[in-house]
Amino acid sequence: MIALSAVIFTAGAAVSTRIPSTRVNVRVVGATAAVLGATFLIPIVSFSTFAVIGFLVLGAGARAVLNTVVYALARSHVPTEALATPIVGVMNVTWAAAALAAPLAAGVALSAGGAKWAFVATAITGFAVAVWMLRPQPRTAYA
């Protein structure tokens, strides 16, 4: 099933690159974060084989979209190409920090209350990001 998840991730990322850059915005990222958060609810409900497969496959699709469009979103708000490289570098450091911290946080959640709490914590984080990105933002007028 890991291989199926990899295929879904690769296909999802390939499809995501076809999204026009004018369509990539914080709402797309927020909605994808909400979908990813929802996938982490699946193992909370059940640890059955079918549930875990659904979690892996659906989560792979959501992560593919998120990992693809977030870079396009960041680059679309950079005024010059010279600033794009440092922005992408900062994003890569952020992803690396999350990849380092996530297993540690999951271990804390696992030892504190069991595997389901790790999924609960991750789902809450996904929903918090979604709410933050989907809430209405005041528009700033530029002269």
Image (cartoon, helix red, strand yellow):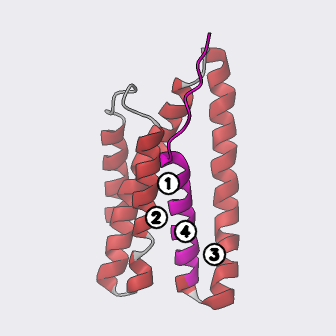
Give the number of the mark in front: 1 or 2. 1
- How many C-alpha atoms fall within 10 Å of the one at disc 3: few (<14), some, or many (≥20)? some
Q: CA distance from mark 1 to mark 3?
A: 20 Å
- In the rendered image, residue 136 lying in the magenta stretch gets the answer yes
Give the number of the mark in front: 3 or 4. 4
Q: Dot 2 corresponds to which residue?
A: 37
Q: Please report whichever mark, 1 or 3, sits nearer to the chain's N-terminal start.
A: 3
The residue nearer to you, when weighing 138 against 9, is 138
Q: Dot 4 corresponds to which residue?
A: 124
- Residue at 46% x, 45% y is 29
- From the viewer's perspective, is 140 left or right of 38? right
The residue nearer to you, when weighing 118 against 13, is 118
Q: Dot 3 corresponds to which residue?
A: 106
Amino acid type of the residue that numbered disc 2 sits on in the rendered structure: Gly
Amino acid type of the residue that numbered disc 1 sits on in the rendered structure: Ala
Q: Please report whichever mark, 3 or 4, sits nearer to the chain's N-terminal start.
A: 3
Q: Which residues are magenta?
A: 117-143
Q: Dot 1 corresponds to which residue?
A: 130
- Residue at 41% x, 43% y is 28
Amino acid type of the residue that numbered disc 4 sits on in the rendered structure: Ile
Marks 1 and 2 in Cβ contact (< 8 Å): yes
Among the 4 quarters of the image, the one containing residue 54: bottom left
Give the number of the mark in front: 3 or 2. 2
